[in-house]
Image: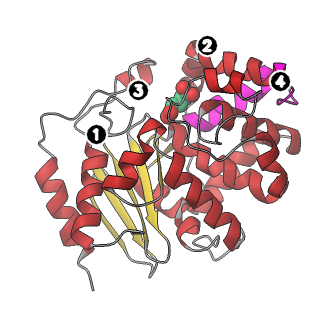
Amino acid sequence: MIDFQNIIEGIHKELKDEMNRGLVASYIPELSNIDAQNFGIHVKHMNGKSYAIGQWNVPFSIQSISKALSLALALPIYKESIWERVDVEPSGNPFNHLTLLELENGIPRNPFINAGAIAIADMLVSHFDNPKQAFLEYVRDLANDQSITFNYDVARSERQTGFGNFAAANLLKSFHNLENDVDEVLDLYFHQCSIEMTCEQLSNAFFMFANHGKCLQQKQHLTQSQAKRINAIMLTCGFYDEAGEFAFEVGLPGKSGVGGGIIALLPNHFTITIWSPGLNEKGNSLLGMKALEQFTTKTKLSIF
Ligand code: GLU
C-alpha cells in the first residue's frame, strides 16, 4: 500500500518555502489580497481514507473549478443535446478568448472556456426556478457539507470587472446560443465562480468523477458514461491553454481555477486537491502543478 501521507508530506516540505510561487490573481481585490504562502494538499482515496497537509482546511475561491460541477449538473438534464451548443475540443487559447467563438458561429470550443461555461449556465437558468440556489445545493450535496457558500463580495467584484464575460455572453446571444437574459445568466456564472471551498471539500465533491458517477454518499449523480466524458474534457481542456502540459507532466484529468486551486483525479483510485494561490503565466497554480507532477511521479499513479 502506498504511503500517501508520507508522500504528500515530503512534497509539501520540499515546496513550501519555494521563493518562486507565481503571482496571485490581481483582477479583483478579494483575490489579490490572498496570502501567497498558503499551500494545502488533500487526498481522498476510494477506500474512504483521507490524507492532508498544510492549509487543506482553509476555504478559497474555487473560480473555474466550478465549471466542471456546473457541467455535471447540466449533463444529466440535457444529455447529448448539450453538445449541440458546446463543443469538446481544446481551445489552445486563454480561457477568456473570444475570436474562436466568432469564427465558429457562437459554439464555444468546450465547456471550460468562459463562453462555454456561460452557455452551460444559460442551460441551468432555463431549467431551474432558482439556479443559484440549485447549484449551491448540488455542490453542498456532492461534498456532503452544508456550510459551503457563495462569497458575495467576490461575485460583486466579478460583475464589476467582468467586461470580457459580458462580451462573451452578448456574442453567444447574437448567435442565438443564449436563451436567457445576459444579466441573469452572468449572475449565476459570477456566483458559481465565487463559491469558497476547502481542499477537503473539493476532494469530496469530485469523488464522483473518480467513482463512475457515484458520490461519497453513494448516490448515482452521473451515468458511468457521463462521468467518463467529463473526465475526458477535464484532461483535454481543464487547464486553460496549458492542458497539454498538464497531461504531459501530471497525467490526470483535472480542473484549475484562478483562486489557485487544482483538483485532479484518478478513476478508481483517488481525488487530490492542491491549493497554492500563486499562478504561473498561464493562470494555473504554480506550486500546484509542481506538486501534482511530483505526486504522480512518486506514487506512479496516473492514467498513463
Ligand atoms: N471568474 C473568472 C472569470 O470568469 C474565472 C477565472 C478562472 O478561474 O478561470 O474571469
Q: Residue at x 29, y 65 (%)?
A: 296
Compared to 158, does 239 lie above or below?
Answer: below
SS type, badge 3: helix
Q: Residues within 10 Å of mark 4 (few under 14, many from 20)?
A: some
Which residue is at the front of the view, 131 or 10? 10
What's the distance in space between the residues labelled 3 and 2, CA to CA?
18 Å
* Mark linked to residue 175: 4
Quarter of image, res 2: bottom left
Residue 58 seen in render: no
Compared to 227, does 161 lie above or below?
Answer: above
Residue at mark 2 = 163
Residue type at mark 3: give it.
Answer: Leu
Q: Are marks 4 and 1 in contact (CB under 8 Å)?
A: no
Residue type at mark 4: give it.
Answer: Phe
Q: Residue at x 28, y 27 (%)?
A: 23
Q: Nearer the viewer, mark 3 or mark 2?
A: 2
* Mark linked to residue 286: 1
Which residues lie in the magenta part? 174-193
Residue at mark 3 = 31
Is residue 119 inside the magenta stretch?
no
Q: Residues within 10 Å of mark 3 (few under 14, many from 20)?
A: some
Q: Earlier in the sequence, mark 3 or mark 1?
A: 3
Q: How is the image coloured?
A: secondary structure
Q: Earlier in the sequence, mark 4 or mark 1?
A: 4
What's the distance in space between the residues labelled 1 and 2, CA to CA?
26 Å
Which residue is at the front of the view, 44 or 119? 119
What's the distance in space between the residues labelled 3 and 1, CA to CA?
16 Å
